[in-house]
Amino acid sequence: MERINTTFYKTKVIPQLQQKYSYSNVHQIPKLRSIHLNRCLGAVSQKIFQKSSEEIAMISGQRPKITYAKKAIAGFQIRKGMPIGMTVTLRRERMYDFLTKFIHLILPRLKDFRGLNPTSFDGNGNYHMGLPDQLAFPEIDYDQIDQYRGMDISIITTAKTDEEAKFLLEALGMRFQ
């Protein structure tokens, strides 16, 4: 298991990208910008919200930012200003640490994992995926959870096309179907 960091990126990934796409300027080479973790809970009790916030903090290594409802939706029992979710933005070393853990520990632990969906790129070089539950993370104790709660993970890159982003993520070690 090779640790992904800036040294790994500079020594292993940049030469592969340069060879395949032959960029004229070093600043054209795509790189990771950030990783976003997002969990939306809706209208839940404060206790559940706090526990979920602690889970995201354990998974990401930093405290999540609470997101609030912008408007009231009666069908979902949500009022304006009510906390409904949380998000974490990882950059620099925490981003690389999370990506290393994600590629080498979490993805192999997913049930029936055969590779990531190659069509989950957004057209701008960013990759988005959802996890069905939090049990794949080694920080989460099975006995401590009361309900399965998934999360969305977005990997933001500076790539201009989805093809470049896919090659970048493959060079970093992600497997696609």
Image: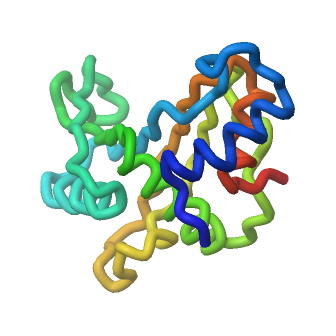
Quarter-of-image position of residue 167: top right
Q: Is residue 124 visible?
A: no
On the picture, is 38 further left or further right than 55?
right
In the picture as drawn, the residue positioned furthest to the top comes out as 24
In the picture shown, does residue 107 fall above or below 81?
A: below
Residue at image point 34% right, 55% down: 60
Quadrant where the N terminus is found in the figure = bottom right
Residue at image point 72% right, 48% down: 171
Residue at image point 28% right, 57% down: 61
Q: Can residue 177 be seen in this view?
A: yes
Residue at image point 62% right, 64% down: 107
In the picture shown, does residue 149 fall above or below 122?
A: below
Front one among 150 and 25: 25
In the picture as drawn, the residue positioned furthest to the bottom comes out as 143
Q: Position of residue 24 (x, y in %)?
A: 74, 14
On the picture, is 61 further left or further right than 37?
left
Scheme of image coloration = rainbow
Q: Where is residue 168 in the image (x, y as percent from the top left)?
A: 70, 39
Front one among 114 and 73: 114
Q: Position of residue 96 (x, y in %)?
A: 46, 50
Quarter-of-image position of residue 66: top left
Front one among 143 and 120: 120
Q: Position of residue 80 (x, y in %)?
A: 19, 22
In the picture shown, does residue 47 fall above or below 20?
A: below
Quarter-of-image position of residue 109: bottom right
